[in-house]
């Protein structure tokens, strides 16, 4: 009984002191940081009069793996482990960010009058369509990032691909921080966009 009484007395004394001095217990967490992929930093190729009347281009559908479809930035660890950063996050849904960056890149690289991106095929489809399935878009901090994707180019027949291929791209990161990691992902998307632009150029009047 005496021990219980002393423990209660000590606890009550501590609470009284905190009340008099204004001390408090705070739960502090690190602030979240938000990132976005960026399009290529190049001047758009001038559109000729022939290209201005040429086919329009749609990027879509674009599929990304479920493990990437989340706010947290995903990185690779040794072996089969992946890591989700609690405080390093995407500023918007990653699929939307990738689609817009690829569309912007193709608009810069291909002399087409209009390049757009949307989730599903609409009744009025454009003349050319690029379907993309991203299998992997990740990497390790301070190491390499990897883009692995399948793509298909369609014309008037939505069920018959004019051309299809799979491509794997690796880019080194310039540092072990998340800004360098996201920049390397943007550069990998730029390389992928140039690979997509090559077959499209052959079908667009110049």
Image (cartoon, rainbow, N blue to C red):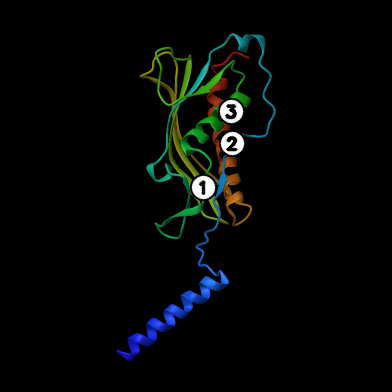
Q: Are marks 2 and 1 in contact (CB under 8 Å)?
A: no
Q: Dot 3, crowdedness within 10 Å: few (<14), some or many (≥20)?
A: some
- Of the two numbered discs 1 and 3 on the same chain, state the one appearing first in sequence: 1
Q: Is residue 164 above or below residue 93?
A: above
User: Is label 3 or label 2 in front?
Assistant: 3
184 shown above or below 104: below
**Image spot of residue 108 (x, y percent):** 63, 26
Local packing at callout 2 (Cα closer than 10 Å; few below 14, some 14-19, many 20+) is many
**Residue that protrudes farthest toward the left in the picture:** 1
Residue 82 in the image: state x and y as whole percent: 43, 55
Q: Which residue is mark 2?
A: 190
Q: Secondary structure at mark 2?
A: helix
Which numbered disc, 2 or 1, marks the residue closer to the eye?
1
Q: Which residue is mark 1?
A: 89
Q: Looking at the rendering, which quadrant does residue 124 occupy? A: top left
Residue at disc 1, secondary structure: strand
Residue at image location 43% in from the left, 83% down from the top: 10
């Amino acid at each position: 009984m005496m021990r219980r009484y002393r423990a209660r007395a000590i606890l009550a004394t501590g609470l009284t002191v905190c009340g008099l001095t204004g001390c408090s217990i705070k739960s502090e967490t690190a602030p979240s940081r938000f990132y976005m992929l960026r399009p290529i930093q190049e001047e758009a190729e001038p559109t000729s009069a022939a290209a201005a009347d040429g086919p329009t281009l749609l990027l879509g559908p674009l599929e990304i793996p479920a493990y990437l479809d989340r706010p947290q930035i995903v990185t690779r660890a040794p072996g089969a482990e992946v890591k989700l950063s609690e405080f390093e996050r995407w500023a918007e849904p990653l699929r939307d960010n990738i689609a817009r960056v690829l569309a912007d890149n193709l608009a810069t690289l291909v002399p087409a009058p209009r390049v757009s991106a949307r989730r599903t095929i609409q009744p009025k489809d454009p003349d050319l369509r690029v379907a993309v399935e991203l299998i992997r878009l990740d990497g390790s901090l301070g190491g390499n990032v990897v883009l692995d994707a399948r793509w298909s180019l369609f014309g008037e027949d939505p069920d018959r691909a004019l051309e299809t291929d799979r491509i794997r791209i690796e880019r080194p990161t310039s540092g072990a921080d998340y800004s360098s990691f996201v920049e390397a992902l943007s550069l990998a998307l730029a390389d992928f966009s140039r690979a997509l632009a090559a077959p499209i150029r052959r079908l667009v009047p110049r």
